Amino acid sequence: MRILATFALFMSPQADAQQADAFGQLVLADLPEGAWVYVDGELAAPEAGTLSLSTGWHEIQIETSADEQISAMRCWVDVAAGAEQTIPCRPAPVNVTGPTIARSGPAGPRGPMGPVGRAPALHLTSDDTPKFIPALKGELTARLRGAAYRLREVRKRYEPPFYIYDPDAATTTGIAGPAGPAGVAGGPGVHGDVERLRDADGQPLLPSIIEQVLIRLDVDGIGELTDDLATTRPLTLGPATIDQWRIDIHTPEFQDELGWKQAEAALPGGRADRPMHLVAGGRGKRGQSAASTGVEAPDIALSPDQVGAIIEALVDDQDTRDTVDQLVDELVDTDMWAADRERRAELADQ
């Protein structure tokens, strides 16, 4: 890079601009202090947590150590010319094992169904718009949190919770472990007041409220917040194999430390296996909505000004913003994980 920087002094402005366009910026968010960063197996030196990389695919690996535990993170990223993208740095433990590693058992049973939604307040009318905001906020945040939870569920089923240091590829999979614990209970059904709110055209208000809030908070590409949100791209990738759990460590001092641990594990009475990856069952279904229980209430149509006031209140609400941020984090993690898995599958087929 020093040679390129010196050569650039003699390039024309046009050539300089073309070279700049051939690179993209990769921001390593929350990069642990003192971490070692490798790009395509070569040591790199991020400036203020940012790497300038040539366009195309690159393997990024981060290695760190704290409290006598070596951790790492490995992913593939596709760098676009002139673009900046961010990946969160969340290293996972790197463990040694004996001759076998227990395979994960099946996921636990699905959690129980949630409670019935709250009955509508029949005395409320369109003049009581501010009183509908808590119910709308509750439903909006419930759907956002539910979507984030489903994304985490998918990754837990298919993403290794730790890496295996096995440079000789000698470790094999053993017998499957037991099923995981039951999932958590589903959330309550839709609040009765939310179900009867309509826009000026008589259409249900909630979908447009969700869409407008996400647009205002600069969130795009989520689509409908339904149970199908996390069941397309990630689930086609299948469970991780032991090869995807293995990791090559590049930092010499970490190699030495893991080598010692590996030798200890091979001694009589040493570690013969790693803890099994127990995956909880899926979250239970949401409870029935208030309307489905036979509770009848007249629809309430709100004017565009009233709808606008509700959207403003939700956008300004810090809890709503925090919940949206949590979902965006899960989407980023899932996209990064899925891209890594897909790239590794492509390389394996070559």
Image: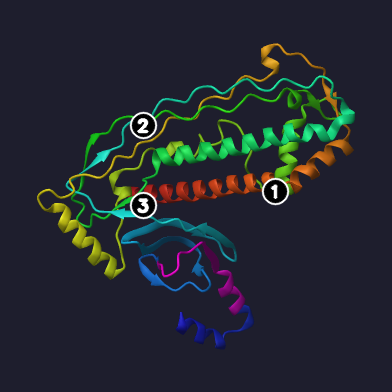
| Residue at numbered disc 3 | 347
First in sequence, mark 3 or 2: give its number.
2
Residue contact between numbered discs 1 and 3, judged by CB atoms under 8 Å: no
Q: Is residue 45 left or right of residue 116?
A: left
Tell which tag, 1 or 3, sits nearer the viewer: 1
* Magenta-highlighted residues: 16-37
Q: Which image quadrant for residue 124? A: top right
Farthest residue to the top: give it: 294
Disc number placed over residue 318 in the picture, else none: 1
> How many residues crowd around disc 3 within 10 Å: few (fewer than 14), some, or many (20 or more)?
few
The amino acid at mark 1 is Gln
Element type where label 1 sits in the image: helix
Residue contact between numbered discs 2 and 1, judged by CB atoms under 8 Å: no
The amino acid at mark 3 is Leu
Tell which tag, 3 or 2, sits nearer the viewer: 2
Q: Residue at x 44, y 37 (%)?
A: 236
Q: Which image quadrant for residue 12? A: bottom right
> How many residues crowd around disc 2 within 10 Å: few (fewer than 14), some, or many (20 or more)?
some
Q: Is residue 99 left or right of residue 5?
A: left
In the rendering, at what x and y percent does residue 297 appear?
Answer: 79, 16
Element type where label 2 sits in the image: loop
Q: Is residue 322 left or right of residue 298?
A: left
CA separation in Å, label 2 and label 1: 35 Å
First in sequence, mark 2 or 1: give its number.
2
Q: Residue at x 21, y 52 (%)?
A: 169
Q: Residue at x 73, y 13 (%)?
A: 295
Disc number placed over residue 180 in the picture, else none: 2
